Amino acid sequence: MARTRSPAYDDQREMILAHAADLFARRGYPATSMNQLAEACGLSKPTLYHYYRDKYALLVQIAEDHVGRLAELVAEIEAEGQPARPRLHRLIIRFVQEYAGAQNAHRVLTEDVRFLEETDRERILVTERRVVDGFARALGELRPDLDAARLAVPVSMLLFGMINWMFTWLRPDGSLDHEAMAPIVADLFLGGLPHVSVPAPPPRGDTP
């Protein structure tokens, strides 16, 4: 009969992941050692290795868990069956709110993904594309002209540019938090969207 893991085992793994994400976010992945992580977790190195085989395994798990949660959010919101505009509004609000509790993991995903091996990096990038595609689908329904001009994904990426880097300037102890900023981001993007025009195609050269 296969042994099942206790809830304490899973809790310990999550605790280690949280400390690893914090250290990677503050110090950078290359500058963080397993010794430092063991000390931060209050564990011995042998105990730490019982849960994760090495620092690289932690990096992969942090990135996969974070982007996987974002993909789940897209799927959950799409399953609600809302029209495009309220769906896009809800996607923006929920993503900004999600980042509030996952700033360390998000920073690791944005800054340390380059240290992943090719197969791991590509697998995570595939999930990231699924996330962007969820936004692009709503955007394409709302603005079919952008979709026809193959601009739904680029415009979605502009939105992610606004959301993804909030951690670089939004201070946890400041007067604004993610909860307050979420509707501002949604209003700013959706309010400006009707004014986005489709660029004219570049002129073609003279035909012989």
Image (cartoon, rainbow, N blue to C red):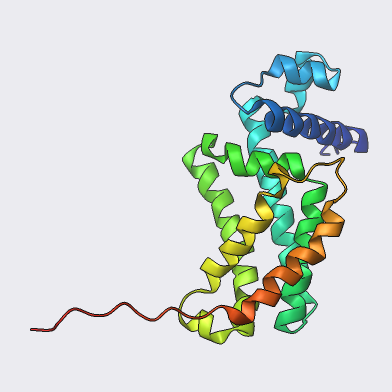
Taking the view exactly as shown, the residue that stands out farthest to the left is: 208
Question: Could you tell me which quadrant the C terminus lies in?
Answer: bottom left
Q: Is residue 172 above or below residue 195?
A: above
Please report the residue visible at 59 percent of the width from the left and 80 percent of the height from the top: 195
Taking depth in this image into account, of 17 and 172 the one nearest to the observer is 172
Residue 12 relative to residue 136: left or right: right
Residue 158 percent across, percent down from the top left? 58, 62
Count of labels shown? 0
Q: Is residue 113 above or below residue 162?
A: above
Please report the residue visible at 69 percent of the width from the left and 18 percent of the height from the top: 34
Q: Residue 45's image quarter?
A: top right
Residue 184 percent across, percent down from the top left? 78, 65
Please report the residue visible at 66 percent of the width from the left and 52 percent of the height from the top: 164
Whether residue 62 is visible to the viewer of this picture, yes or no, is: yes
Q: Residue 39's image quarter?
A: top right
Question: Could you tell me which quadrant the N terminus lies in?
Answer: top right
Whether residue 78 is visible to the viewer of this picture, yes or no, is: no
Please report the residue visible at 59 percent of the width from the left and 36 percent of the height from the top: 112
Q: Is residue 56 above or below residue 98?
A: above
Residue 16 percent across, percent down from the top left? 80, 29
Taking depth in this image into account, of 131 and 25 the one nearest to the observer is 25
Residue 133 percent across, percent down from the top left? 59, 68
